[in-house]
Amino acid sequence: MTRDEALAVITKALIATVGSVDGDLAEDTNLVDDGLLDSLDSMTFLFELENDLGSKLEAIDETYDDFRVGALVDIVVQATS
Amino acid sequence: MTVHTLDVGLRGTRDYIQGSQILARTGELVAAESVEPVALLTAKFTRITEQGVRVALDEDDAAEGVELGRAQYTRGGERRTVRFFEVPGPAAHRIDDVPKVTSELIADAAGAASCAFAIAGSFESYLVAVIEFVKAAHAARGEDVVDIWFTALMGAQLPLAATYPTAGTLRLTPKIERVVDGRLQTLGVLDTEGVGAPPSFQICFSCVVRT
């Protein structure tokens, strides 16, 4: 999966979680720190993301806390390569 | 403005108002406004209370008190977001406890679990069974798991009408776990087996794992 494709999957999971997203997601956006997701939403977001990918993201364990879009893109690209 | 005080109480020895009561009483208010069938889609609780609860039935309604959470119902295809608020003042009145409705719990250390249930078949009795089951599944993970709370459900299609199976099986499949501010947050998929069972949905709980 390319970075653009990974970004599209992440955006889709985000929309499924919060309903809508204003504009395009930038790689330096932090979904939690920038207020797009609260801690409960982040669970739903990860669930939607793994559902869309059809597999568990092993890099995201219970202590994972880096919700920068760029970091998530890295994980998705690596998991699907 | 459509802000209502809910008829809820502290059930048995609990020191908090159950989410199942809040969601059921609110659903009745939403259903009373229309002949269209009503179903619960999502619920999210950010705080608990031992006091009374008010519900603002429209998102723009102003209500006093600390916000406890939100829920979304559908009524004839229209989505409706409601907000819950604590009623400032003394603790709510006490109401009788209800007997346990789940049995035969089987759970593993990772949080996967199943149980049998026997309920009246109403919306509230189903919610009580689900929450009782998932709470027990978390407790079964070990004696070091305490302070277990129902926090949210998503992706649901739970009718307010009494269409639920009176007996069947509940299954929990763990999906996501995160540690936030020292608490373990879990998201699992809840499946129901039985005649007239609703589709699966996601349910979130929060607990403390003592180290």
Image (cartoon, coloured by chain):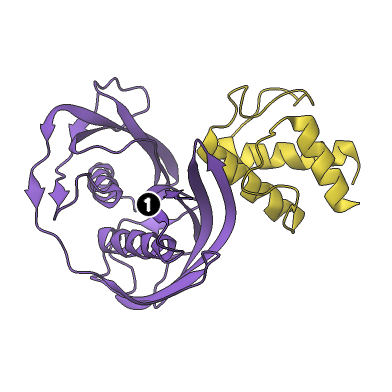
Provide the letter of the chain coloured yellow.
A
The residue that label 1 is drawn on is B148
* Residue B76 seen in the figure: no
| Nearer to the camera, B111 or A22 | B111
**Chain letter belonging to callout 1:** B
Q: Secondary structure at mark 1?
A: strand
Q: Position of residue B71 (x, y in %)?
A: 38, 40
* Residue B210 seen in the figure: yes
Instruction: Please give left or right for residue B173 compared with residue B193 in the image.
Output: right
Instruction: Please give left or right for residue B80 compared with residue B102 in the image.
Output: right
Depicted A20 relative to depicted B183: above or below? above
Q: Position of residue A70 (x, y in %)?
A: 80, 31
Provide the letter of the chain coloured purple.
B
Q: How many marks?
A: 1
Q: Residue at x 49, y 39 (%)?
A: B182
Instruction: Please give left or right for residue A62 compared with residue B143 in the image.
Output: right
Amino acid type indicated by mark 1: Ile
